């Protein structure tokens, strides 16, 4: 079965046929770096990391572009629109770029914790002002945008007369226009459905650039159209993001790109569903936004303990990306146990020796394992169903453990199947799902510390105080205290 992807544009699963194989262009809307990344950021970037990993496994050469929104994301409230970053920078009395730098670094750090692969290109909105202005000029020239008081708006009503506005989100323009009347007179826009391509900067606005329409800053939607076109061309394979971006962000991207490039920008539009927390939508108004740093440390009223990034990654992948996903402390505790069990099984499997080379692989257990393994690719080909993949891996674990514990005789499974099982689990767990052992980092660290303890003991017994002191003092500088116990043992703890 070839890979099928659910396309939000056509609302059906479609066979994946890249525009220019083996190359695949994938654009994913990146974060607005006006604050710390929260749980809502984890799902899209982990989802599309697995898409990237699986396409690579299938042999495609993916150019993955994920932008950083460091300007242009604002709440559109009449003339007084203010850029989110500019607003926060004023509030914290720092340079906007100081803020951007800080939160971009934090975002990158969190993504590393989740073991996501780096995008090939990570363009920023502020680095592409010229491209955005060029695109806006084209839209004005084509007659689909108008200038008011130094701001430029996209004329949605005019666009909708000749194009299918709402094709992605299913929104009906008449309904959008309906809501406009109440605002009439207060707004520069001809219709409420119109969106800003460029905003004139009020005097106190610190982020501003020169443009043909005066000093201002770009709208949010235009940055993605400009950067996707620049790095992936007018038409590329996959455009991804969270479902909350369907409207107005992605709908607007399509409209802008149609006017400038006369083509639907992406062949496949993919959207991950949203997360809820204890059954409630996550949002400031519910007071339940959990930052990733709070998740990793456990310091949040809704959390009973700290959760490792791998537990969160595993928890996200246990549900298909198009289903909603409810976070709760209890569910994460269960996921943590599940990942531990799965990884122990994987470690045990690696230790089982292949010795039944003569055994044919057509006995019942071989057949069962092989059919479970055959299904892994089938599930992934069915719109990246990581949930079903993990369910199959969980069916394999008890078999591994039974062989290890001697409950199942070693000689019932052929070497051929055992070998295939080892390969498949490594490829799936590590390469495609991008999972890691929960204790991997700790185990390595503990091992290194034990080594230092042994060296120090040895040095002391040889009266080599230079070496033994050096180890103790240098560790102290790193915040690790080594103590000589009365019984001659050496203990340590990280302060
Ligand atoms: Zn975007």
Image (cartoon, rainbow, N blue to C red):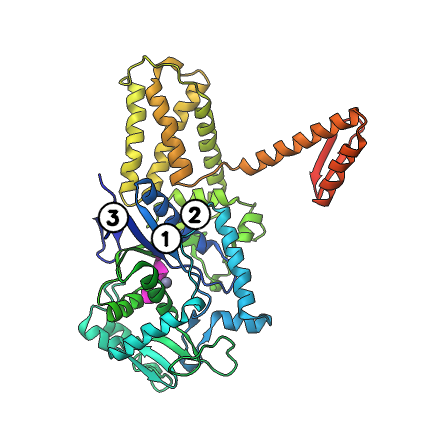
Q: CA distance from mark 2 to mark 1?
A: 10 Å
Name the residue located 45 percent from the left edge and 36 percent from the top edge: 338
**Ligand 1 placement by image quarter:** bottom left
CB under 8 Å between callouts 3 and 1? no
Other residues around mark 3 within 10 Å, as few (<14) / some (14–19) / many (≥20): few
Instruction: Answer left or right for 185 relative to 85.
Output: left
In this rendering, the answer to whether 85 lies above or below 13 is below
Q: Position of residue 450 (x, y in %)?
A: 66, 30
Q: Which mark identifies residue 129?
A: none
Name the residue located 74 percent from the left edge and 25 percent from the top edge: 458
Q: Which residues are magenta?
A: 241-249
Membership of 244 in magenta stretch:
yes
Identify which residue, 88 or 59, lies in the foreground. Answer: 59
Q: Earlier in the sequence, mark 3 or mark 1?
A: 3
Q: Earlier in the sequence, mark 3 or mark 2?
A: 3
Residue occupied by mark 2 = 117
Residue occupied by mark 3 = 21
In this rendering, the answer to whether 347 lies above or below 198 is above
Identify which residue, 141 or 99, lies in the foreground. Answer: 141
């Amino acid at each position: 079965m070839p890979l099928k992807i659910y396309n939000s544009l056509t609302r059906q699963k479609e066979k994946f046929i890249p525009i220019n194989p083996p190359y695949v262009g994938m654009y994913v809307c990146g974060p607005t770096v006006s604050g710390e990344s929260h749980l809502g950021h984890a799902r899209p970037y982990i989802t599309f990391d697995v898409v990237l990993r699986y396409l690579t496994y299938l042999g495609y050469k993916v150019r993955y572009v994920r932008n950083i929104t460091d300007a242009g994301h604002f709440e559109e409230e009449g003339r007084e629109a203010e850029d989110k970053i500019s607003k926060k920078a004023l509030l914290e009395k720092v340079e906007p770029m100081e803020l951007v730098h800080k939160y971009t670094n934090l975002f990158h750090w969190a993504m590393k914790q989740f073991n996501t692969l780096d995008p090939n290109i990570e363009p920023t909105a502020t680095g592409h002002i010229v491209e955005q202005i060029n695109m806006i000029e084209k839209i004005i020239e084509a007659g689909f945008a108008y200038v008011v008081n130094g701001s430029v708006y996209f004329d949605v009503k005019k666009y909708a007369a000749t194009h299918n506005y709402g094709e992605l989100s299913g929104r009906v323009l008449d309904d959008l226009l309906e809501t406009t009347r109440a605002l009439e007179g207060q707004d520069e826009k001809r219709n409420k459905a119109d969106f800003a391509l460029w905003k004139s900067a009020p005097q106190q606005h610190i982020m501003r650039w020169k443009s043909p329409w005066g000093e201002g800053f770009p709208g949010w939607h235009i940055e993605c159209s400009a950067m996707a076109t620049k790095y992936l061309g007018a038409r590329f394979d996959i455009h991804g993001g969270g479902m909350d971006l369907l409207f107005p962000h992605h709908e607007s991207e399509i409209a802008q790109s149609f006017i400038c490039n006369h083509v639907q920008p992406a062949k496949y539009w993919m959207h991950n569903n949203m997360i809820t927390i204890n059954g409630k939508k996550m949002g400031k108004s519910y007071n339940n936004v959990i930052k990733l740093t709070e998740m990793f440390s456990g310091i949040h009223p809704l959390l009973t303990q700290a959760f490792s990034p791998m537990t969160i990654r595993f928890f996200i992948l246990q549900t298909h990306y198009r289903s909603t996903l409810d976070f709760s402390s209890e569910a994460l505790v269960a996921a943590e146990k599940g990942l531990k069990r799965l990884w122990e099984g994987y470690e045990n499997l690696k230790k089982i020796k292949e010795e039944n080379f003569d055994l044919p692989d057509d006995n019942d257990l071989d057949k069962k394992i092989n059919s479970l393994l055959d299904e892994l690719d089938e599930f992934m080909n069915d719109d990246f169903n990581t949930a079903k993949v993990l369910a199959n891996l969980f069916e394999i674990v008890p078999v591994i453990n039974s062989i290890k514990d001697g409950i199942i005789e070693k000689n019932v499974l052929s070497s051929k199947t055992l070998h295939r099982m080892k390969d498949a689990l490594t490829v799936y767990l590590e390469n495609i799902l991008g999972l890691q052992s929960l204790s991997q980092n700790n185990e390595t660290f503990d091992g290194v510390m034990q080594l230092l303890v042994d060296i120090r003991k040895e040095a002391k017994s040889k009266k080599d105080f230079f070496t033994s002191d050096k180890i103790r003092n240098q560790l102290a500088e790193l915040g690790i205290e080594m103590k000589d116990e009365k019984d001659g043992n050496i203990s340590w703890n990280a302060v």
